[in-house]
Amino acid sequence: MFRIVDNGSSHRGKKAANRLTAAFPNAMMVPTPVYASWLNQGEIYFSVVQREGVSPNDFTDLTQVGDRLRAFEDRSNATAQPFQWRFTTFDLDDLPARLDRHTADHQEESSVGLAS
């Protein structure tokens, strides 16, 4: 069984893998690629909210947070445009080959380090 996880801090490192294995001995953790937020549309939206809606986060109470988020929502709804994706169908077709090259490069680095 595979468990696909994002790169959040609760999913990184040996401790996270051990927690998963303890709960599900036949599971394998598979992280999404770093900087692959294009895989998660919700992550993209909340990233925009964080950057454009609540930054700077100098709130003194929760009412201010709510007011700022409602103002962002109103502004966003009035000016919304489709995202301009940089990841093309060519990039998608080329992804397996790029991953193979990346894996091969790291295997070569590892074997060079062991030979030293």
Image: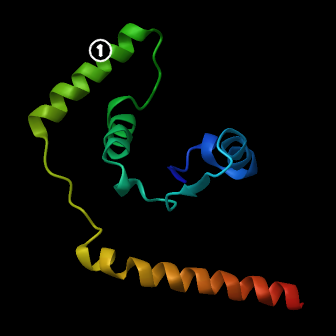
Looking at the rendered structure, the kind of residue marked 1 is Asp
Asked whether 30 or 35 is in front, the reply is 30
Tell me the residue at 28%/67% (across/down): 86
**In the depicted structure, whether residue 110 falls above or below residue 38:** below
Q: Quadrant of the C terminus?
A: bottom right
Neighbor class of circle 1 (other Cα within 10 Å; few <14, some 14-19, many 20+) is few
Q: Position of residue 112 (x, y in %)?
A: 79, 90
Determine which quarter of the picture holds residue 79.
top left
Tell whether 100 sits left or right of 96. Answer: right
Tell whether 89 sits left or right of 12. Answer: left
In this figure, which colouring scheme has been used for the structure? rainbow
**In the depicted structure, whether residue 86 falls above or below residue 21:** below
Tell me the residue at 31%/41% (across/down): 45
Tell whether 70 sits left or right of 16. Answer: left
Q: Position of residue 3 (x, y in %)?
A: 53, 50
Determine which quarter of the picture holds residue 97.
bottom left
Please identify the residue farthest to the left as the structure is shown: 78
Q: Position of residue 57 (x, y in %)?
A: 46, 26
Q: Quadrant of the N terminus?
A: bottom right
Please identify the residue farthest to the right as the structure is shown: 116
Asked whether 86 or 110 is in front, the reply is 110
Tell whether 26 sits left or right of 30. Answer: right
For label 1, the SS is helix
Residue named by callout 1: 67
**In the depicted structure, whether residue 58 falls above or below residue 18:** above
Tell me the residue at 49%/58% (across/down): 32
